[in-house]
Image (spheres, rainbow, N blue to C red):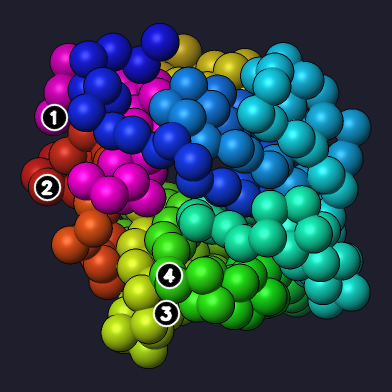
């Protein structure tokens, strides 16, 4: 379903854990990974949503509940992964919290908004990575892909979403720390920074004016689709991406390449 670009990517026999598996980009990721031969576990705080997506994908996918900001919940997830798969070949750190209405500039953002964003995005991703990495290392290695954001590389000109952007910037360092520290033990770690992606949620929330502005800012004739992110991640966790680690790959239509006057 994702075109000829994925035909050279083979995930046969691989087990992949995707956090934030209850919606957004995860549905497309899970479907693609299964199409390419992997077994997929979708973990989300909304267990029903993760299980529903796994059900739509069909055989090869399972859903499970997990609050990544809660250490005991993450430990339970790791035990399930160990019992179900024995080991995991790839971890996709995709879960994130964003409070669009209340995450403003530094002076206007409430401390509670900042704390919750960091608790999920940064601390939660750290907890999952810390719990899953030993399973990978004991199995001879694996790949970690952390989904960050364009806003973790360059803040929007509006100055909004200071907590979200800062959390994503910190995740870039976490991804690189994993690459540097555990590379010789068989672990590859990269970050993928999506730009504006035409998900159902985005199309439902953004105004036509904002969509038009986003289309004008990219260097391509179109905005990105979920499969653009999924294809990139599938490549990174496959053997085709075996020599790529410690990188931040911007999948953003080149929006940060030029100045928007």
In this rendered view, identify the residue nearer to me: 117 or 160.
117
**Spatial CA span between label 4 and label 1:** 37 Å
For the question of whether residue 229 can be seen, the reply is no
State the SS at label 1: loop
- Residue sitting nearer the eye, 11 or 77: 11
Can the viewer see residue 179? yes
Report the number of discs.
Answer: 4
Q: Which residue is mark 2?
A: 257
Q: Residue at x 29, y 42 (%)?
A: 235
Up/down of 139 relative to 229, above or below: below
| Mark 1 to mark 2 CA distance (whole Å) | 8 Å
Q: Which class describes the residues within 10 Å of circle 3: few (<14), some (14-19), or many (20+)? A: many
Question: Which stretch is magenta?
Answer: 212-240
Quarter holding the C terminus is top left
Tag 1 and tag 3, C-beta contact below 8 Å: no
Q: Can you identify the residue that label 3 sits on?
A: 178
Q: Nearer the viewer, residue 44 or 199?
A: 44
Q: Is residue 55 left or right of residue 232?
A: right
Mark toward the viewer: 4 or 2: 4
Residues at marks 1 and 2 touching, judged by CB atoms closer than 8 Å: yes
| Comparing labels 4 and 1, the label whose residue is closer to the camera | 4
List x then y, in percent, for residue 216.
22, 23
Mark 3 vs mark 4, CA separation in Å: 12 Å
Horizontal side, residue 138 vs residue 124: left or right: left
Q: Nearer the viewer, residue 149 or 211?
A: 149
Earlier-in-chain disc, 1 versus 2: 1
């Amino acid at each position: 379903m994702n075109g000829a670009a994925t035909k050279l990517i083979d995930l046969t026999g691989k087990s992949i854990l995707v956090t934030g598996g209850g919606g957004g980009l995860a549905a497309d990721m899970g479907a693609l990974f299964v199409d390419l031969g992997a077994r997929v576990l979708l973990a989300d705080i909304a267990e029903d949503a993760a299980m529903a997506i796994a059900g739509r994908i069909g055989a090869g996918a399972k859903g499970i509940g997990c609050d990544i900001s809660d250490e005991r919940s993450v430990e339970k997830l790791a035990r399930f992964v160990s019992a179900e798969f024995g080991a995991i070949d790839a971890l996709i750190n995709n879960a994130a919290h964003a409070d669009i209405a209340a995450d403003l500039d530094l002076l206007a953002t409430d401390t509670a908004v900042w704390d919750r964003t960091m608790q999920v995005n940064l601390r939660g991703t750290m907890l999952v990575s810390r719990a899953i990495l030993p399973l990978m290392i004991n199995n001879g290695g694996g790949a970690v892909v952390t989904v960050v954001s364009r806003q973790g590389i360059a803040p929007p000109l509006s100055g909004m979403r200071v907590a979200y952007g800062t959390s994503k910037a910190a995740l870039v360092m976490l991804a690189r720390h994993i690459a540097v520290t555990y590379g010789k033990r068989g672990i590859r770690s990269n970050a993928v920074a999506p730009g504006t992606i035409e998900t159902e949620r985005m199309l439902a929330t953004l105004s036509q004016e904002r969509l038009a502005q986003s289309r004008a800012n990219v260097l391509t004739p179109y905005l990105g689709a979920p499969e653009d992110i999924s294809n990139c991640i599938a490549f990174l966790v496959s053997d085709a991406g075996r020599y790529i680690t410690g990188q931040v790959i911007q999948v953003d239509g080149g929006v940060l390449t030029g100045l928007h006057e």
